[in-house]
Image: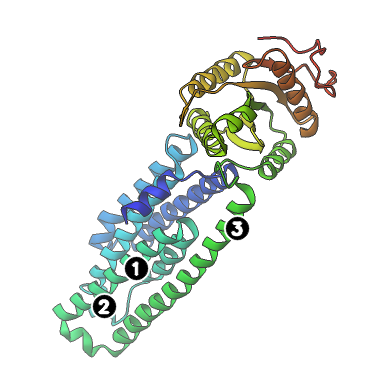
Amino acid sequence: MGGAFRQYLQQDTPEEEARLLHRMFVITAAIMFIGSAAALWVQAPNYDPLDLRALPAVAAVNLLLIPAVLMGRLDPRPAFLTSYAVDALYLLSAYAHQYEVFAPLYGLLSQNTYWFPALYVGAFLIFPHALARYLTQTLLALTVLITAMQLGRNPTLLNHRDLIGSVTQFLLVSMVLQVMLIRFGAMRDRLSAMQTAAYRDALTGAYNRRYAEEHLASLQASHTPYSLILMDLDHFKSVNDQHGHAVGDGVLVGVTRLTRNVLPEGGMVARWGGEEFLILLPQRSEEDLRHFIGTLREQYQTLHVGPLLGVTACFGVAHGGPDETPESVLARADAAMYLAKNGGRDDLRFAGHRGARTRSRNPTLTDLPVR
């Protein structure tokens, strides 16, 4: 199952989903911290020996992870895995411990058993289906193993009918919940595949034009400034004509890969159409954008696909904000890009301010400063 862990930790997460993961983790970790503290408060001053050692550790881990995620020092995905592992380890330890302390005295399972369903449901809400299935099946198997071992070590517990009834109900509910959640996970996977097909370019894996347009609309709605780059590969038709469409497709895939490798945090790349790409970044200065595009051009020169070594492109850059429609920003970037193309290719131009002439694609525009 190492592949499931690696895929989860390395998967490309859309920006909206990443923000949701951040919020979910902070809320979940805060609940676990409060729950741990509340459990200790309720027990005072007669603390359970295990809880006295374990609950402060659970609370501390979740409390430490929250600022790390909020400040961007830790991705919420490994944070979720860490928190889940710590919480599951505590619940399994408490479940085993109660057969020695709580169950013989009261003939019932203790209240911390109520948290097991949250672990099952949480796994399928947070993690991909394959990873969630592995985690919950492991959790269920360990629970059954602990039950068998503890009842085997203390056969007198079998005389407590209420205890056996509660244990049986607990395990049966866990199994039913597992089956239902596996079905839910399969449905979520299909929904995710449909979403991927709707928002990803099938060839390159980059976002498609539909997603980029919706993302631009969301940036405007949230009054978020941004920098927009339209990029068009030079002489791409001749690549297809001379080397074949397989090489051309390889170029598009390679350019996407190289672009994504150097994207700063918060950036995205979409295939805008044909050999044209759109890159969105949090608003950057002209100097930063020149440096970023210079890095892209250097990377593109290293691209090796069949007999082809290195490609060039033209770039048009515009800044967008809440006071301008995405269509207007795109038009200015488009005009800048075509001015670069008409100026000799392998070039970069910055668009003029809003209101500058942007309808024509001829090189007579004078409001676009040259590189």
Q: Is residue 283 left or right of residue 75?
A: right
Q: From what the image shows, is residue 10 above or below residue 290?
A: below
Q: Residue furthest left?
A: 153
Name the residue that disc number 3 marks.
194
Question: Counting residues from the N terminus, which is met first, the one under dot 1 or under dot 2?
Answer: 2
Mark 1 residue element: helix
Can I make out residue 79 in this image?
no
Name the residue that disc number 2 marks.
103
Q: From what the image shows, is residue 362 above or below residue 195?
A: above
Question: Counting residues from the N terminus, which is met first, the one under dot 1 or under dot 3?
Answer: 1
Question: Counting residues from the N terminus, which is met first, the one under dot 2 or under dot 3?
Answer: 2
Callout 2 crowding tier (Cα within 10 Å): few <14, some 14–19, many ≥20: some
The residue at 28%/82% (across/down) is: 107
Q: Nearer the viewer, residue 47 or 195?
A: 195
Q: Amino acid at mark 2?
A: Ala
- The percent coordinates of residue 135 (x first, y second) are 36, 62
Q: From what the image shows, is residue 44 above or below residue 106?
A: above
Q: From what the image shows, is residue 55 above or below residue 242?
A: below
